Every structure is written in C-alpha cells, then in structure tokens.
Image (spheres, rainbow, N blue to C red):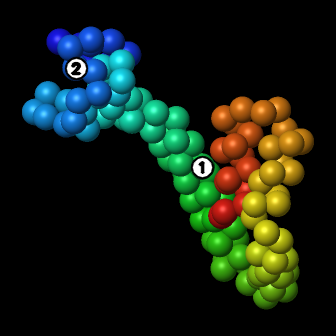
Amino acid sequence: IEQSGERVNAYAQAHAGNHFYILGTDYLGRDLFSRILYGTRISLEIALIASFFDLAIGVVYGITSGWVGGRVDTLMQRIIEIMLSIPNLVVMVLLILVLKPGMSAIILSIAITSW
C-alpha cells in the first residue's frame, strides 16, 4: 500500500493514529505523517546547506584572524562586532528583497547573517 501522503483513502478519512497511520489521516484519508515528512524536506535542505556555508565562512575567518594576529585580528574583531550590532532579521529581509527570490537567496541570507 502506497504511503506517499497524496493518495486519498475514503475508508480512512479523519481517523486517529493506529498501527498503519502513525499520526492518523486528514479529512481526505491522506497519511499525515508522510505529509509532514515531505513538508520538512525543504526546511532541512536549507538548514543543512546554510550550516555548511556558516561553518566554512566562520572557520576561514577565524583561522585568518588567529593566524595573522595583531592589527588584522583587531580589525576583524571590530567587523564582527559591527555585524553583531545589526539585527539579523533586517539584513535577511533586505538580502532576500535584493536577490532573486528563491531557496538560494534564503540560504545565502542565512549564511551571511549567522556565521
């Protein structure tokens, strides 16, 4: 039996969870658990890709700051302090407005503001 979350099952409409449908079904008899898993796919992709870019930017920036030291380290720390003084949400919204709307703009705005 297919559990894609798209198949309508007239006999399982609006039932509570059981051994076959973990979270039950909606009013059309579709499996809610499958639909939730399918819906979180995009959110997880964005989170994982943005986290990878955050890690890459932060490691390179931190290694550069620590390796060079001196005035360069002080300057890099002041840049970080200035960035932290600006609210992330404002920067993210402005970046998404400037860039072409889509998943890549969301990933880029999260990566730039949260490293």
7 to 33, vertically: above or below: above
Residue type at tag 1:
Ala
Residue drawn at (82%, 58%), measured in percent from left and top?
Answer: 91
Which residue occupies the foreground of this view, 91 or 14?
A: 14
Q: Residues within 10 Å of mark 1 (few under 14, many from 20)?
A: many
Residue drawn at (65%, 72%), measured in percent from left and top?
Answer: 62
One can see residue 103 in this view: yes
Q: Residues within 10 Å of mark 2 (few under 14, many from 20)?
A: some
Which residue occupies the foreground of this view, 41 or 78?
A: 41
Left or right of 82 on screen, residue 8: left
Q: Rounded to the nearest whole Å, what is the CA distance between mark 1 and mark 2?
A: 39 Å
What kind of element bears circle 1?
A: helix
Q: Nearer the viewer, mark 1 or mark 2?
A: 2
Residue beneath label 1, please? 50
What kind of element bears circle 2?
A: helix
Q: Residue furthest right?
A: 98
Residue 99: which disc? none
Residue beneath label 2, please? 12
68 to 47, vertically: above or below: below
- Image quarter in which the N terminus is found: top left
Which residue occupies the foreground of this view, 85 or 7?
A: 7
Residue drawn at (53%, 48%), measured in percent from left and top?
Answer: 47
Q: Position of residue 107 (x, y in %)?
A: 66, 44
Instruction: Assess whether mark 2 and mark 1 are in contact (beta carbons under 8 angstroms).
Output: no
